[in-house]
Amino acid sequence: MAEAPGLGWPESCAAGTSVRTGEGAGVGWPVSRETDPEKAMMTAAMEKSAAMEKSAIRATGETIVSRPRMVSKKMVAPRESAVSGEPVVPAPAEEGVVDGMSTPSWRGRETAVAAGASRAMSDWPRPASCRVITIANQKGGVGKTTTAVNLAAGLALHGAKVLVVDLDPQGNASTALNVDHHAGVPSIYNVLVDDLPLSSIVRQAEELTGLYCAPATIDLAGAEIELVPMVARETRLARALAAYDRSDLDYIFVDCPPSLGLLTVNALVAAAEVLIPIQCEYYALEGLEQLLRSVDLVRDHLNADLALSTILLTMYDARTRLAAQVAEDVRAHFGQIVLGAVIPRSVRVSEAPSYGQSVLSYDPGSSGALAYVEAARELSMRNVRRSLVVE
Ligand SMILES: Nc1ncnc2c1ncn2[C@@H]1O[C@H](COP(=O)(O)OP(=O)(O)O)[C@@H](O)[C@H]1O
Ligand SMILES: [Mg+2]
């Protein structure tokens, strides 16, 4: 195992030994401007034309420059495609610092959505049965919610039916999908604690047909404690999912809170796959051992079908050597389960939720959007056939 000293690798991580060499090329590794003069020229040209377009829009008054908060644009994912598209390669171009008032080019967005729409489900296989994927990492701010929302949007854009179960009391996934989650709204809390059927709380996300959300409200903050004395406290989400008619669903993503408490245990028991987002930063690997131990414990005692299926590298900053070192080390350690796509650190990704949108609709041509589309495509190609384990 190739270990980078000082990166905080857990000693007893179950490691994949295969090192995938040359993976980065063509699958979204950001390339710094300094090292790629051709890209730098292209980037400069793109920025110039975007700036010209923006000023033209301002001058003609065709549209307002800043969008009202929480306004989302419904997109309809086609079921068929006439075009067999090549894999989407995230653009390495860095995005400019945004002043919070500007928005991406509307024309660019429509073009990219149309391009994405034309690459529909003919080359993205639908799973034989619904895949339940828990997105877990007890560290906060590593991109769990961002990953849940944008992978779901990427898959839905290509014709899949996707449910995002928000299991974090902060309700960030519900916010990002623009689904009401004020205190008192029937939510995943009522499903876990009051045995409300999941079907009664699932809402269609405005952004895309085929994209659904089971919202979380702040009530869920009490659930960790309220669940303790309850019967079958670890399997309540699994039972709710088992009772839910998911015959028409292709994917369920469960967005975990930043802890390894009962909510995360419920998510691990309910899923067949675990996806761990790993931030390409110094402390990213600390705590990983604990998370992997929790996955092992759940597999041993509560859900024998559980597999660590996917690792996604997030917030990759091409300007730092550390990001490259973390990414390289994660690949060396975990091998095949690390997706080739890497999510770059991108202003657009962090702005999108405040508009109640995924980055795919907020700025589909941005490097973050393209990277998430590529990650979603890889996930669909892996197409692990698993089902829920609930008697
Ligand atoms: N690729 C990215 N580039 C820039 N900011 C990001 C990226 N991914 C996530 N963020 C931002 O980082 C913060 C934490 O991300 P989030 O997905 O909420 O993490 P978690 O769910 O693990 O706590 C959020 O403000 C989010 O908008
Ligand atoms: Mg979150």
Image (cartoon, rainbow, N blue to C red):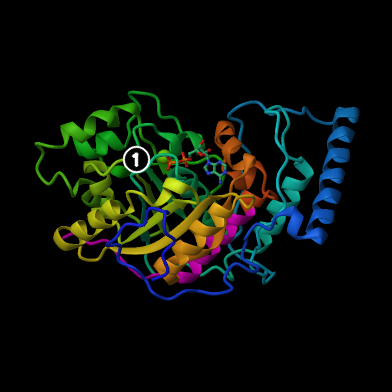
Which residue is at a point 21% across and 35% down the rendered structure image?
Answer: 224
Say if 3 sits above or below 244 in the image.
Answer: below
Q: Secondary structure at mark 1?
A: loop
Would residue 329 appear left or right of 247 to someone viewing this image?
right
Residue type, numbered disc 1: Pro
Which residue is at a point 65% across and 63% down the rendered structure image?
Answer: 88
Would residue 95 appear left or right of 308 to someone viewing this image?
right
Q: Residues within 10 Å of mark 1 (few under 14, many from 20)?
A: some
Which of the pair 201/103 is nearer the observer? Answer: 103
Which residue is at a point 18% across and 57% down the rendered structure image?
Answer: 297
Q: Residue furthest top?
A: 183
Q: How many marks?
A: 1
Q: Is residue 157 visible?
A: no
Quarter of the image for the N terminus: give it. bottom left
Ligand 1 closer than 8 Å to the CB at disc 1?
yes
Which residue is at a point 46% across and 70% down the rendered structure image?
Answer: 382
Say if 145 sits above or below 175 in the image.
Answer: below
Q: Is residue 327 visible?
A: yes
| x and y, in percent, of residue 184 in the image | 32, 24
| x and y, in percent, of residue 328 in the image | 51, 63
Q: Which residue is mark 1?
A: 258
| x and y, in percent, of residue 168 in the image | 35, 37
344 inside magenta stretch: no
The residues colored magenta run 370-391
